[in-house]
Image (spheres, grey):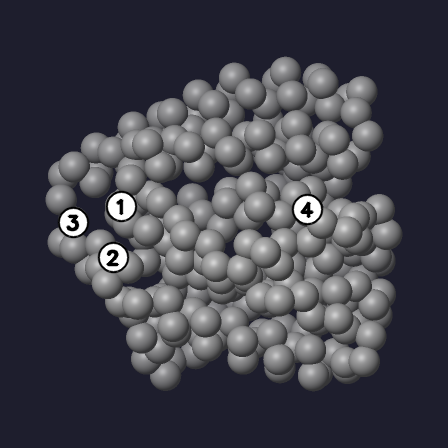
Amino acid sequence: MSSLSSSATTPLNPLYVLRTLVFYITLALITLLWFPPSLLAGLFLPLKARNRVIMVVYCHMAMWAARLICGLRWQVQGLENVPQDGRGYVLLSKHQSSWETFFLPLILAPHVQVVKRELAYLPVFGWALNMIQPIFIDRSQKTNALKQVLTQGADRLGKGIHVLVFPEGTRVPPGKRKVFSKGGAMLATKTGAPVLAIAHNSGEHWPNNSWIKRPGTIQVVISPVIETTSLSTAELNEQTERWINEQVDRVSATPFQGEYSEAESSGKRF
């Protein structure tokens, strides 16, 4: 599969810089033009419809811009596993960049993410987040954060809204891993919600350690539905961690180097 991501190893050139600059300018314009009317419309919509109008449409426009301007494409394996039964699923995803936060709403909607509380106070973007009711947590209070995930997550799942959790808790660059936390698996086993695991190699084209986007095709793999009623939290966590790591290794041009990240903070770049 390494040929699928060969562009990740292409030396940086000025065209990538120019295309990325144009993309960010376009994304800023989309944000400024779309959020005000969508927030206004959202005041009169139920939660699921509000999620689709405010975030899903926005993410479609952002991914369209990334594809047209930066040459970022994607292939998805396992689309037949995307649920159509109206239940809320726990989505456990690999986390390498911001790309997946834009892309996953295109195929798994409506869903909310577990996000740090500070994002709620950002102008415009924070207002949009508040309206779609993500799960805000205080990362400095780990015990309380887990309670918030379990309580608020159960509420969203009960409304038929998927909950997206990044078990690594931070962006981890290609070729490295981080031990999965059990919060997402615990939410699933406590509520009996089914799980979808998601693997990808987004960091090879939308790297976290650089703002420059590299053209190429990002590979995404969606697992079959995992029913959780007969699984313990530890069993589910181990099963999804193993599956995600195996699939990431399969679709990546950057092999696992045996290094595990221990950083508490991701040093996130947009």
The amino acid pointed to by label 4 is: His
Q: Disc 1, disc 3: CB below 8 Å?
A: no
Picture residue at 65% right of the left edge, 50% below the top: 113
Q: Position of residue 232 (x, y in %)?
A: 77, 82
Which-is-in-front pick, marks 3 and 4? 4
Disc 2 marks which residue?
8
Q: Disc 2, disc 4: CB below 8 Å?
A: no
Which-is-in-front pick, marks 3 and 2? 2
| Label annotation for residue 215 | 1
Q: Tell me if 250 is positioned left or right of 171 in this view.
A: left
The amino acid pointed to by label 1 is: Pro
Mark 1 lies on a secondary structure that is loop
Q: CA distance from mark 3 to mark 4?
A: 35 Å
- The one nearer the camera, 160 or 25, is 160
Q: Disc 3, disc 4: CB below 8 Å?
A: no
The amino acid pointed to by label 3 is: Leu
Residue 139 against residue 71 in the figure, above or below: below
Disc 4 marks which residue?
111
